[in-house]
Image (cartoon, rainbow, N blue to C red):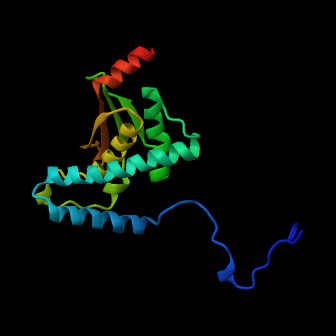
Amino acid sequence: MIGVGKIKQYSNILDKPLSKGKQEVSLSAFAFLFSELVQYNQTQVDNIAELERRLEDAGYAVGARVLELLCHRDKGNRRETRLLGILSFVHSTVWKVLFGKVADSLEKGTEHEDEYMISEKELLVNKFISIPKDMGTFNCGAFVAGIVRGVLDGAGFPAVVTAHFVPMEGQQRPRTTILIKFAEEVLRREARLG
């Protein structure tokens, strides 16, 4: 047997194979690409609501792919079937893969049974964004809301997902809350499963 037990020596650094390493994207590269995405879509729309919808649609495609990747890689092609399971999956696993940490909080809405909120003190897509005064309440978190909607829809939990700024006392920048309002069919299925 040739080469068994031997460590292959490379004469040139360019001959070495690339290591897998951590699958991270440079923050500056992401910021540049996201900025270009926002600027391109800004030229295609007439108002802020349409711009947020386009960012959400772009995020939806990312979310669908992230779900497929994570279910295949981490779960052996199994998906969550329970409401709290999928929320926990988004709050921890998906968030950690996308942003390098678990989301700051996951809360159930107090006014409506079908609402949940994922809050982030400094959402990465809003971190380096300065919003002109004429754009008012524009929130780049719509992209992340689209990612969450893509993950939930792909897993069989249809929902309306929106991003909102929530002012925080003593903080200059508001935190971003991703509001998830599940479809009635999801709540009926959850009640049936017990």
Q: Is residue 116 above or below residue 37?
A: above
**Residue 155, how many percent across, how many down?**
42, 36
Label tally: 0
Choose top left, top right, bottom left or bottom right for residue 108: top left
Q: What residue occupies the far bottom of the structure in this picture?
A: 11
Q: What residue is shown at x 61% (from left), y 63% (from top)?
A: 21
**Residue 190, how many percent across, how many down?**
40, 20
For the C terminus, give its image quadrant: top left
Q: Is residue 122 above or below residue 105?
A: below
For the N terminus, give its image quadrant: bottom right
Q: What residue is shown at x 37% (from left), y 55% (from top)?
A: 124
Q: What residue is shown at x 57% (from left), y 43% (from top)?
A: 74
Q: Give the left or right position of residue 168, taking residue 83 as reference.
A: left
Q: What residue is shown at x 10% (from left), y 59% (from top)?
A: 134
Q: Could you tell me if residue 173 is visible in this image?
A: no
Q: Nearer the viewer, residue 133 or 116?
A: 116
Choose top left, top right, bottom left or bottom right for residue 28: bottom left
**Residue 169, how many percent across, how many down?**
28, 42
Q: Is residue 6 above or below residue 68?
A: below
Q: Could you tell me if residue 38 is visible in this image?
A: yes
**Residue 92, how many percent across, how many down?**
49, 41
